[in-house]
Image (tube, helix red, strand yellow):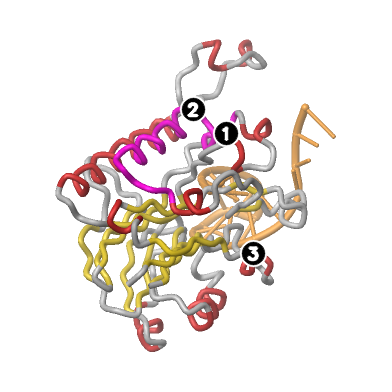
Amino acid sequence: MKIASWNVNSLKARRAHVENYLAKSGLDVLMVQELKGLDFPHKEFEKLGWHTAAVTQKTYNGVAVFSKTPVKVIKDALPGDKNDEQARYLEFETGGIRLIDIYLPNGNPVFSEASPSNRGSDPRLRGDAFSEKFTYKLSWMKRLYKRLKTLREDNIPFAIGGDFNVIPEDMDCYDPKKWLDDALFQPESRAALRKLLHLGLTEAFRALHPNAPGHYTFWDYQAGAWPKNHGIRIDHFLLSPELADRLINCTIDKAPRGWDKPSDHTPIIIEIDP
DNA sequence: ATGCCTAACCCCGTTAGA
């Protein structure tokens, strides 16, 4: 069973890419993120032979799944905050497996804007407050921990994939120094990701490719990042023990990043022994 | 040291991405 995750950076803009990928990649399930629109073309994809489910909002965020087998939605929002209206979480069952598709908040900027007199000094030494966006990221990760802990305690096997917006380790970016001030690279973000792993989850790519730097899932559109391979690895799959034991392969498919008018992310694929 | 690029919305410059 082949399952992929891909941040498409607007489904509308990447519609042909997604259809092409579904037709040719041999996937059983494709989870996508950052749809950037309220409308989701369920019928059109059903005509192409895919079962679908989506959580969308206007302009921002949005996650969806395409599957060869029927999709039963378990949750269309991350529990823990009824006032959170951002479309970032979809939990479902398909092909006999519980899957979770996430678009984890980016969180930049890390700190609230400094007063003019304080600019230039280190915001951490200054004791600046975290920004609203970074606070939201960390609280979202705390809520995610609670949800995954519940699934573990209930002995429900699952795989969670998506755009985690966290660079796990220094080897997961081309130049760690350039990311020191970024929300994706903060100690708090990385600790929250490790905490998820401490529930007994396996990070699929790193488990199968230990000590292998230079493998990325995102390359900025700017400054020639793609041809220079100046990327970061932020799209991940985490597997509960039952599925980790069935993990055959985990690869990053760089091809779609080289297509015309590409997303800035490229798909990550896991293969599970049926 | 800074901006670089892309997408959505409608304000066609601003916000967000990462």
Residue A33 at x, y percent in the picture: 44, 59
Residue A201 among those drawn in magenta: yes
Judging from the image, mark 3 belongs to the subunit labelled: A
Residue A145 at x, y percent in the picture: 29, 40
Q: Residue furthest left?
A: A154
N-terminal of the pair, mark 2 or mark 3, is 2
Q: Amino acid at mark 3?
A: Arg
Q: Give SS at disc 1.
A: loop
Q: Which residue is mark 3?
A: A257
Same chain letter for marks 2 and 3 = yes
Residue occupying the point 31% across, 35% down: A142
Q: CA distance from mark 2 to mark 3?
A: 29 Å
Residue A6 among those drawn in magenta: no
Residue occupying the point 31% across, 70% down: A53
N-terminal of the pair, mark 3 or mark 1, is 1
Q: Is residue A214 left or right of residue A82?
A: right
Q: Looking at the image, is A250 positioned above or below residue A274?
A: above
Q: Looking at the image, is A35 positioned above or below residue A177?
A: below
Quadrant showing the N terminus of chain A:
bottom left
Q: Which residue is mark 2?
A: A187
Residue occupying the point 60% across, 29% down: A181
Q: Which residue is mark 1?
A: A182
Q: CA distance from mark 1 to mark 2?
A: 10 Å
Q: Looking at the image, how many numbered discs can be counted on the residues?
A: 3
Q: Looking at the image, is A273 positioned above or below residue A180?
A: below
Q: CA distance from mark 3 to mark 1?
A: 23 Å
Judging from the image, mark 1 belongs to the subunit labelled: A
Give the crowd class for mark 2: few <14, some 14-19, many >=20 residues within 10 Å: few
Q: Which residues are magenta?
A: A181-203
